[in-house]
Each structure stands twice: as structure tokens, then as C-alpha cells.
């Protein structure tokens, strides 16, 4: 089997179309199961009460937000090195979902912070580095949007993504160091007293739900990007909706 | 015969410095921007000396960051407009050296003045003497790193719609580590806890940017000139 067959936009377009609904359906099903476990099966936490239940959304979102940036930089780098169109399109398709996940993680973190810390926002190390990650996503998206020529936009944003991915760990650790020095928040999210097995299961299911949703959504967006860029190609007219 | 990389570095540096000398007002604009931004903080926060002393490291460093960013646009735009940049990219000498020369010239005309005026502004905030020394050292190590990182953003946004604001959007998040350790060094010195660790990490960041940034700037310039 020749895997490189699918590195052509024309070949990947129908494949993505076949895969996307499955991933989205899996995401919806797993999400329903995960939310049921999270809201009904999992017991109330004796310290945080019911407010802890936000972690079933928060943790998977935060996880995806970081992972997607790395995957995006990977595809952008491949696109820059080998000049493969589909890789660059993949990077562009990933960025909005990554930004959405970052925003979700920040939003749910803030919702969790209000009952737990008594404030919507603290300059906690994780919240702060997540905020800067959001800025990095916004920078990538703005640069890609500001350049009209798609091939040039691909390359320029790829360089930015690669510079960003080198910086992400540096930013993360410098923010963490800055935070411990200033001793801002005294309560940390890491202090999780032995999580009940059912909570862990709920979280795991939600993580898979987020994975499936992200893959499905990115494939759909990729299809739109392919169709927009390849609209002058002969196959695009024949492929139909 | 193509001249050596060192000769090319010197030639580009000398040329850029000469251009900067002939446009002295540009250098002064950046400098006065720095001074004015720092002076706005006491007006906004209030004149209590204790508060001002506490926020001084952050205020001076954030203002230096903004001033360094403001001058990024002129690093490549003139050469881009008159075609010089194309010739530099086509030159037989390694582009990384030529880019390094341009960044060095930018730092000498936009970064070094900030280092010189920095302690004076620190004095306005009643920083102790040892903190002022650390402020100078941290700016001396930190502003070249700002120029290196900023040049990547400037090169990427060459000839792009809304260049200036876009450069800020790309570059400012990448400036965060430099800001943390730069301002952290000054704050540590003011508290008397020793700034060595912060300054070492700041130096490490400068080294890292010296290694990676010229490559990224070169790649970005080639893309912008396509």
C-alpha cells in the first residue's frame, strides 16, 4: 500500500470526507457517556463539592490545546521542508480548533476558579502560560490571514509555528518560575487527593471524546481548505459536495 | 571573487549604522517613546514612592520591550522597499551573517540607547544603586535577545497588510521569557536576593536566540521576497 497516495489533496479529500463523520459521531457518543459519568456517576468531591466536575471538560481541553500546537508545528514544518501542500493545509486546519480548545480551557479554568479560589482569574502559572498559548495561536491565525497568497501564507506561518514551538517550553517554565517566585496562588490544581476510579474513567472517556471531536472537526475544515484552494483543478469540479 | 563572511558582516553593519546616523531622529523617537511610557506610570498609578519602587522593574522592562518593538518596523522595510534586501538575499555570502549584521546594527541604534537611559528612569522610581546596576546589565543582555526575536517577526510581516500591529501580535508573546527574567533580575536585586540566576537564564536565552533566530530570519526574508 502506498501511503503517499494520500499526501495529494485530491486523494485525501474523499478519504477525509469518509472519516470525518465517524470521528464526529464517536466524539458525540463518547462525550455523552463521559458527561453522564461526570455529572451523575461520579461522586461529589468532599473538598470542592460539585464544582470540581468542570475538570471533565477542562482537563481534556487543556490537553488538546497544547497537543494541537505541537501537531500544527509538525505539519507546518513538514510543509516547509518538503513543500507538500496538504501538510500546510493541515496546519491551517488545526489552528482554529487549537485556539478554541485553549479558549475553552481558559474559560472553564476561570469558572472553576470562582468557587474554588473566590476569583475569576489568578495569575497562576498554568492559567498564564495557557493565556500566552492563546496569544501564540492568535498570532499564527492573524499572520496566515494577513497574507493573500496562500503558498506564501503557508510558509510564513510555518516559520512562526516553528519559532513558537521552540518557545512554548521556555515560556512554560519561565512562567512557572515567575509564579513560584511571586507566590501568587496558594492553591494549586496539581494537588489532587487520590482521585476516585470512576472520576478517572470519566476523564479518560472525555479525553477520547475531545480527541475524536478535534480530529473530525479538523478533517472537515481541511476539506473546506482543500476545496477552496483546489477549486480550479479538474477533480474539484467533478468531486461534488 | 566573493568577499569573506566577516567582511560582508562589517560592510552591512557599517552601512546600516551610517543610514541610522543620517536619520538620527528615528533613534531619538524610540528613546523618547521609552522615556514617555515610563513616565506615564506614576501618573496612572499615583506618586507613592513605595508603590513605585515595587513596580519599577516591571515598568521599565515592559516599556523597554514596547520601545524595542516599535523600532522593529524600520529594520527591513527601507531595504525591502528599495530592493536592497533582494540583493542581500542573492549575495554569495551566507545570509545568516548578513542578517546578524542587520540585527546588530538595529540593536546598536535602538537597543543600546535604552540600556544607557534605563538607569536614569530607574532613578526616578527610587531604585537602589545595586538594582540600577542590575537593570543596566539585564537590559544589556536582554535587549539583543529582543532584537533577535523581534527581527523574525519583522521579517515575516514585510509587505503584509497591517504590518505594525501584526508584528506586535507575533512578537510580544515570544518576548515573555525575556521580560520575566529581565524584570525578575532587577526585582531580585532590589530585594537583595541576588540576581545571578535570572541573569544567567537571560544570557542563555540570548545564546539560544543567537543560534536559532538568524536561520529563522533568513528563511522569513526569503519567503517575504518571493
Image: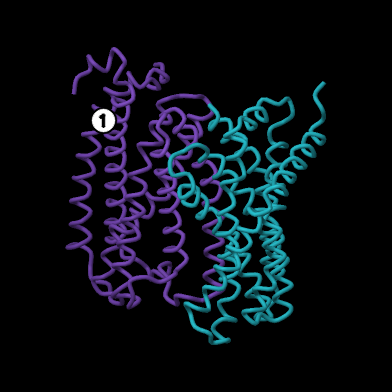
- Measured as percent of width and height from the top left, residue A227 is found at 28, 25
Drawn side of residue A119 relative to residue B89, left or right? left
Choose between B94 and B13: the one closer to the eye.
Answer: B13
Chain ID at mark 1: A
Colour of chain A, in one word, is purple
> Number of labelled discs?
1
What residue would you read off at disc 1?
A19
B8 relative to B40 in the view: left or right: right
Taking the view exactly as shown, the residue that stands out farthest to the top is: A234
The chain painted cyan is B
Quarter of the image with the N terminus of chain B is top right
Quarter of the rendering containing residue A149: top left
Query: Based on the displayed image, in which of its 4 quarters is residue B122 positioned?
Result: bottom right
Q: Find residue B225 and report its horizontal and vertical position in percent.
A: 55, 29
The local secondary structure at tag 1 comes to: helix
| Horizontal arrangement in the rendering, residue A96 relative to residue B128 (left or right) | left
Residue occupying image coordinates x 41% and y 20%: A3
Q: Please name the residue shown 22% across and 47% down the image.
A: A30
In which quarter of the view is residue A18 placed? top left
Q: Where's residue B222, x and y in %?
A: 58, 30
Colour convention: by chain
| Residue A29 in view (yes/no) | yes
Closer to us: A93 or A206:
A93
Q: Position of residue B33 (x, y in %)?
A: 58, 62
Q: Which residue is nearer to you in this view: B1 or B134?
A: B1
Name the residue rendered at 73%, 49% in the picture. B21
Q: 10 Å neighbourhood of mark 1: few (<14), some, or many (≥20)?
A: some
Amino acid at each position: 500500500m502506498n501511503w503517499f497516495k494520500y499526501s495529494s489533496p485530491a486523494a485525501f479529500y474523499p478519504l477525509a470526507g469518509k472519516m470525518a463523520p465517524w470521528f464526529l459521531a464517536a466524539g458525540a457518543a463518547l462525550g455523552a457517556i463521559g458527561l453522564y459519568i461526570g455529572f451523575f456517576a461520579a461522586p461529589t468531591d468532599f473538598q470542592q463539592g460539585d464544582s470540581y466536575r468542570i475538570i471533565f471538560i477542562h482537563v481534556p481541553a487543556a490537553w488538546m490545546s497544547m497537543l494541537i500546537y505541537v501537531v500544527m508545528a509538525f505539519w507546518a514544518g513538514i510543509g516547509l521542508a518538503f513543500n507538500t501542500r496538504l501538510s500546510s493545509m493541515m496546519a491551517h486546519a488545526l489552528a482554529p480548533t487549537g485556539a478554541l480548545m485553549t479558549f475553552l480551557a481558559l474559560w472553564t479554568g476561570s469558572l472553576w476558579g470562582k468557587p474554588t479560589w473566590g476569583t475569576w482569574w489568578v495569575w497562576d502559572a498554568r492559567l498564564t502560560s495557557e493565556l500566552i498559548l492563546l496569544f501564540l495561536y492568535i498570532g499564527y491565525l492573524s499572520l496566515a490571514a494577513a497574507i493573500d497568497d496562500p503558498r506564501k501564507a503557508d510558509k510564513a506561518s510555518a516559520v512562526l509555528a516553528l519559532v513558537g514551538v521552540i518557545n512554548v517550553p521556555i515560556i512554560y517554565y519561565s512562567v512557572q518560575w515567575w509564579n513560584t517566585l511571586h507566590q501568587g496562588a496558594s492553591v494549586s490544581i496539581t494537588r489532587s487527593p487520590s482521585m476516585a476510579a470512576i472520576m478517572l474513567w470519566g476523564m479518560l472517556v472525555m479525553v477520547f471524546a475531545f480527541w475524536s471531536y478535534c480530529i473530525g472537526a479538523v478533517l472537515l475544515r481541511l476539506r473546506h481548505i482543500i476545496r477552496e484552494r483546489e477549486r480550479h483543478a479538474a477533480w474539484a469540479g467533478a468531486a461534488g459536495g | 571573487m566573493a568577499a569573506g563572511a566577516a567582511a560582508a558582516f562589517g560592510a552591512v553593519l557599517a552601512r546600516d549604522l551610517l543610514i541610522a546616523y543620517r536619520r538620527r531622529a528615528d533613534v531619538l523617537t524610540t528613546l523618547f517613546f521609552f522615556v514617555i511610557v515610563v513616565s506615564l506610570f506614576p501618573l496612572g498609578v499615583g506618586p507613592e514612592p513605595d508603590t513605585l519602587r515595587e513596580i519599577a522593574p516591571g515598568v521599565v522592562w515592559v516599556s523597554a520591550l514596547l520601545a524595542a518593538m516599535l523600532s522593529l518596523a524600520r529594520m527591513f522595510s527601507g531595504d525591502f522597499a528599495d530592493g536592497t534586501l533582494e540583493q542581500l538575499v542573492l549575495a554569495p555570502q551566507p545570509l545568516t551573517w548578513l542578517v546578524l549584521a542587520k540585527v546588530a546594527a538595529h540593536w546598536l541604534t535602538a537597543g543600546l540607547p535604552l540600556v544607557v537611559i534605563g538607569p536614569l528612569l530607574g532613578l526616578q522610581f527610587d531604585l537602589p544603586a545595586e538594582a540600577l546596576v542590575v537593570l543596566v546589565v539585564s537590559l544589556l543582555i536582554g535587549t539583543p535577545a529582543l532584537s533577535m526575536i523581534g527581527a523574525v517577526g519583522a521579517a515575516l510581516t514585510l509587505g503584509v497588510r497591517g504590518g505594525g500591529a501584526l508584528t506586535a501580535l507575533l512578537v510580544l508573546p515570544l518576548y515573555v521569557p525575556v521580560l520575566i527574567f529581565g524584570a525578575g533580575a532587577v526585582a531580585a536585586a532590589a530585594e537583595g536576593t541576588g540576581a545571578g540566576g535570572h541573569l544567567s537564564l537571560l544570557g542563555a536565552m540570548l545564546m539560544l536566540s543567537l543560534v536559532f533566530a538568524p536561520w529563522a530570519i533568513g528563511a522569513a526574508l526569503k519567503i517575504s521576497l518571493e
